[in-house]
Image (cartoon, helix red, strand yellow):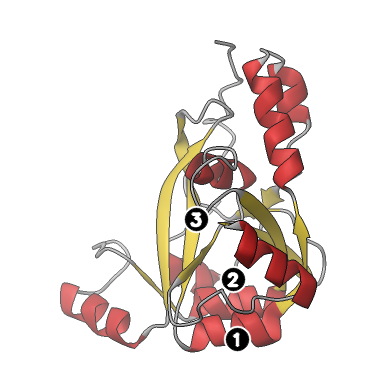
Amino acid sequence: MGELTDTATTTVHREVRAGYTDRTITVYQAYSDAIADAALAAGTFVPPFRRGRMTWIKPSFLWMAYRCGWASKRDQERVLAVEVTREGFEWALDHACLSHYEPATHRSREDWAERKKRSPVRVQWDPERDVYHRPLPHRSIQIGLGGEAVEKYVDEWIVGLSDVTATMRRIRGLVAAGRVDEAVGSLPPERPYPLGEGTAATVGASRR
């Protein structure tokens, strides 16, 4: 198994890292063929996608790869890169609540419970993964959209979708073949995403 450069000294513990432009940010989701094909044809999510369920978006390509097993898990065989407006993405974070109570983020457990009850968005910080799916010291954000948030996501925020399943599987093949440098070089570029002070505080992000 190859060695990867330790980025712990240069990567902030909790920060949003993503591919983005001045107007949009890319997030990833994995679905069945039926949902993926319908979404690609419509340019947004339509049935059999269900709006009534919380949908989780992930800015990290590698965390998506870990979650779906390089597009091999059942009903996660297709990976979509979803371009959403930065305005919408930031609305989601501003209206989010952490999935778990954290004393450093919330004034009290009661305040957290009340915010969780009102918020249509959940945020989790899970260990980022390398190309072998080993956990790294820093965290990757997962954003769960429900209620009003998923309606806005589907109807307002999505600018475009593309199928990146082939890229996901090609990188997996490079890793399996021991061509780690080539695999890492094939990953979509991601960089720290700028969060306002209030937004960072809401989601418990680390500050540089």
Residue flagged by tag 1: what amino acid is it?
A: Lys
Mark toward the start of the polypeptide (3 vs 2): 3
- Viewer-closest of 123 and 193: 123
Within-10-Å neighbours for mark 2: few <14, some 14–19, many 20+: few
Image quarter (top left, top right, bottom left or bottom right) of the N terminus: top right
Q: CA distance from mark 3 to mark 2?
A: 16 Å
> Can you name the residue that lies furthest to the front here?
34
Q: Residue at x 22, y 78 (%)?
A: 113
Q: Where's residue 80, x and y in %? A: 68, 57
Residue 48, picture quadrant: bottom right
Does 9 appear above or below 96? above
Q: Residue at x 28, y 84 (%)?
A: 117
Does 93 appear above or below 16? below
Viewer-side label of 3, 1:
1
Q: Say which residue label 2 marks.
A: 196
Q: Which mark is residue 141?
A: 3
Query: What is the secondary structure assignment of the residue under circle 2?
Result: loop
